[in-house]
Amino acid sequence: MVRTCWGDNAGQFARKGVLANFRSGLSVYEQVDVGIAGAGIAGLTTALTLNGLNPQLMDDVRIQLFERSSAPGEAGAGIQISPNGCSVLDRLGLLDPLVDISAAPVAIRIVSARNQRCHVTVPLGSAAVLRYGYPYLTVHRQALHELLHSAVTDQIGQDAILFDAGVDEVIDHPDHGLLRLTTGEQMTLDLVVGADGIHSSVRDVVGEDVLPRFTGHVAWRGVVPQSVLSKASPITETITSWMAPGCHAVTYPLGDGRINIVFVEEEHDWQSESWTVRGDVEMLKERVQHWHPDIRALVASLSEVYRWALFDRPVPSQWYGHHVVLVGDSCHAMLPYAAQGAVMAIEDAEQLAVSLVGPPSTASKGSARGLADFSSALADYQRHRIQRVRWVQALARRHGQLFHLNKWASAAARLGMRILNTSYPAYFQKRNDWLMGYQVPPRR
């Protein structure tokens, strides 16, 4: 397959040569034993960024992932990978195979749920590539997970992931991390990466217990064949947010002939956070009985649907200890309204690798286990990430509020969006530049 030169014709926000930041070398650490708790999207991407710091240093970084489940897999349905995530995956050599299994929606639309009247259109497709240098993709979460899993086993080794091995305890000593598994095994590591998700066993080790807050919102999700819609339906090639008083839905293609649908409503009495609780399709049909025929057709075709309650968690002020660090949902779980949860984890993974490299002028052999090295690197990682993640988390909250306004406030918001979209078409696109045009910066 001919490799696409993503970024070569990049717009004003794409930057070339980011990989050069990696070349200054983990040679500052002669040999580092890294244990990653969790083999989801965050853990697998972190393994790849650390392993790929410098090809000639592959033997210097020994990486082992520990996964509680008994086999590879990822719960969930669709996932959106915006250009800021695609740029990282490109530097890992995974963007072309990801494009092959994904859809590339031509636009984001915000429409009325009853009649599909469009209030906002944000161009994607070729417009995203021209503006940011990378595409905006939608894909089934399981397909992305399989791609990352295959890359880890190919590049690091077939035994890189230990299954049926949850993290039972982590002790952060001043000169090493100690990890105990549910299997009873214990190991000493130079660095423990907590990538074990929203119910992280590693998070408490860094000294801050961030309690969840129920938002009062419950989400339903499922996938249906694209064939239930006419080929002329814009749903088949766009990310569409459907607004209604107190609730909303999002639909988009997955690249495999199916459409992902998520419906979110206000419900204060049901607070299960699991992604694997089945919902009642008939109940969901009632919720959308007065919506546009396209949505009703999608819901009517659902063979199964899952529900989960949405919880919000503040971003902690401390992400690391002596030899322990957090990435992804274990640190900063996101509400889904900005579609950035997985992408923030992907950005975390690259930033951690860049921060661990250190400036080339100070590289010196044999300092792997020196506290100052890790303390400086992990502090640099948090310094680069914490404010951006807080901004994205705040953006998701604002979107959630917008999508769940009452009848009159929702009508006023839709009118305001239509006026902006008509009189200043580039407004909503420019508002996304800070988000989608982001590139992981070099270490300070």
Image (cartoon, rainbow, N blue to C red):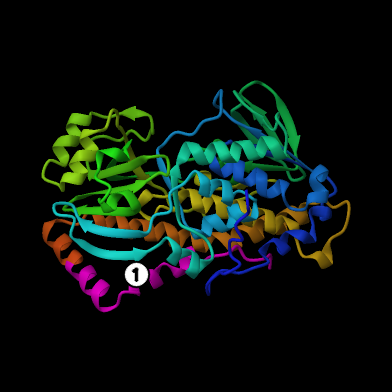
Give the amino acid type for the residue marked by disc 1 in the picture. Answer: Phe
Identify the residue at the far right of this view.
365
Q: Dot 1: few (<14), some (14–19), or many (≥20) neighbours within 10 Å?
A: some
Q: Main secondary structure of the magenta part?
A: helix
379, 143: nearer the viewer? 143
Residue visible at 54% across and 26% down in the picture: 69
Q: Which residue is mark 1?
A: 428
The percent coordinates of residue 87 (x first, y second) are 57, 58
Q: Judge from the rendering whether residue 340 lies leftward or rightward of residue 381; answer left or right.
A: left
Residue visible at 18% across and 30% down in the picture: 282
Residue visible at 12% across and 40% down in the picture: 289
Identify the residue at the far top of this view.
183
Residue 153 against residue 2 in the figure, above or below: above
Q: Tell me if I can see residue 368 in this picture.
A: no
Start-end of magenta stretch? 415-444
The picture quadrant where one finds residue 169 is top right
Q: Judge from the rendering whether residue 130 lies leftward or rightward of residue 411; answer left or right.
A: right
342, 404: nearer the viewer? 342
